[in-house]
Image: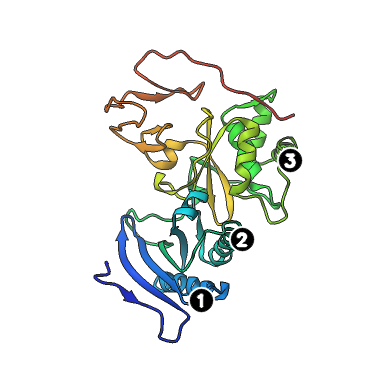
């Protein structure tokens, strides 16, 4: 599907003008809409009504699934380089809260006319290779975090550290207990909060807390919302060489233990954050043939060819 010309969605008496400028189907049953919103006054209520109209129109044919909204505005893009994919029932409030903070912090932000790109990912059942929300219970490359508290993020992080044997002074039995979600997992996660200075929030910790965890651990944390590198919602601090991977869905974090298995690819470039099967041109490497690129099972470093000097992993004392 693709819109051939601009379609005005707002009515004559509305205090805003909502125009659908483009509509098309992306690969893997992903639907993309481009909108232009023009406001006739500067009231917050006007923008809220226009925004809700835009979202409602986008999801009218896809009542179940997730949505990603990116405002094409220089100031907004600069402040928010990564926009999350959310479930429909949370996207409106979360996005409006973000916009309200921007309005209060940037006097030069003018919303008289804003262009939005809306991506809709329906949650459908059926055959084929359509992108869907993963069944984590059947995904061997994922450790499902089963918790009755609000610290699934820190639990997922320490579980990733345990599965990669990055926790110092832990026995193999203790690492196994963390991976299995036993009480030790919660204690170590709570220790991570205390040592990193990240408070445990009643509503749960989120992507905004990841930087503090990264800076404490000196590890790059990369968060996916689906098993495709197109849906990395947090790509972490590039200054850190060590990487761990989390899967974010339904306001919950799980641990990715095998990134190539998760992406269903033979290899994964840790520089470009791209999974591939045969060839890949790395942005930091002029050589186009990366078939011999490997990740060391012991030190987790990327290397090419047969010669590799294994380096020691960073170890983290969480006791």
> Foreground: 128 or 88?
88
Q: Which mark is residue 190?
A: 3
Q: Which mark is residue 41?
A: 1
> Foreground: 4 or 254?
4
The secondary element bearing badge 3 is classed as helix
Q: Please provide percent x and percent y for residue 216.
A: 66, 33
Q: Residues within 10 Å of mark 1 (few under 14, many from 20)?
A: few
The residues bearing labels 1 and 3 have C-alpha atoms spaced at a distance of 48 Å
Q: Does 295 appear above or below 3? A: above
Residue 266 appears anywhere in the view: yes
Residues tagged 2 and 1 counted as in contact (Cβ below 8 A): no
Residue 180 appears anywhere in the view: no
Q: Which mark is residue 104?
A: 2
Q: Nearer the viewer, mark 1 or mark 3?
A: 1
Residue 302, located in which quarter of the rendered image? top left
Colour mapping: rainbow
The secondary element bearing badge 1 is classed as loop
């Amino acid at each position: 599907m693709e819109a051939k010309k601009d379609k005005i969605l707002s009515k004559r008496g509305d205090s805003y003008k909502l125009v659908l400028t483009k509509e098309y189907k992306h690969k893997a049953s992903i639907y993309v809409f481009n909108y232009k919103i023009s406001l006739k006054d500067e009231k917050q209520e006007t923008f809220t009504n226009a925004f809700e109209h835009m979202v409602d129109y986008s999801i009218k044919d896809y009542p179940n699934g997730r949505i990603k909204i990116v405002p094409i505005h220089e100031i907004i893009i600069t402040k928010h380089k990564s926009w999350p994919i959310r479930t429909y029932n949370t996207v409106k409030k979360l996005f409006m809260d973000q916009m309200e903070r921007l309005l209060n912090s940037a006097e030069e932000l003018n919303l008289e006319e804003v262009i939005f790109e809306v991506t809709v990912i329906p949650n459908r059942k059926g055959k084929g290779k359509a992108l869907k929300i993963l069944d984590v219970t059947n995904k061997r490359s994922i450790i499902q975090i089963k918790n009755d508290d609000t610290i699934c993020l820190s639990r997922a992080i320490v579980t990733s550290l345990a599965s990669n044997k990055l926790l110092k002074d832990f026995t193999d039995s203790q690492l196994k207990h963390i991976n299995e979600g036993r009480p030790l997992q919660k204690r170590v996660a709570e220790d991570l909060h205390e040592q990193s200075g990240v408070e445990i929030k009643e509503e749960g910790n989120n992507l905004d807390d990841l930087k503090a965890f990264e800076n404490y651990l000196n590890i790059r944390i990369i968060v996916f919302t689906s098993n495709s590198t197109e849906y990395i919602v947090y790509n972490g601090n590039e200054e850190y060489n060590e990487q761990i991977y989390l899967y974010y869905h339904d306001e919950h974090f799980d641990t990715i233990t095998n990134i190539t298995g998760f992406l269903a690819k033979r290899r994964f470039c840790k520089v470009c954050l791209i999974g591939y099967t045969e060839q890949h041109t790395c942005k930091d490497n002029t050589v186009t043939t990366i078939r011999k690129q490997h990740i060391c099972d012991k030190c987790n470093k990327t290397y090419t060819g047969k010669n590799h000097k294994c380096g020691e992993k960073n170890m983290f004392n969480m006791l």
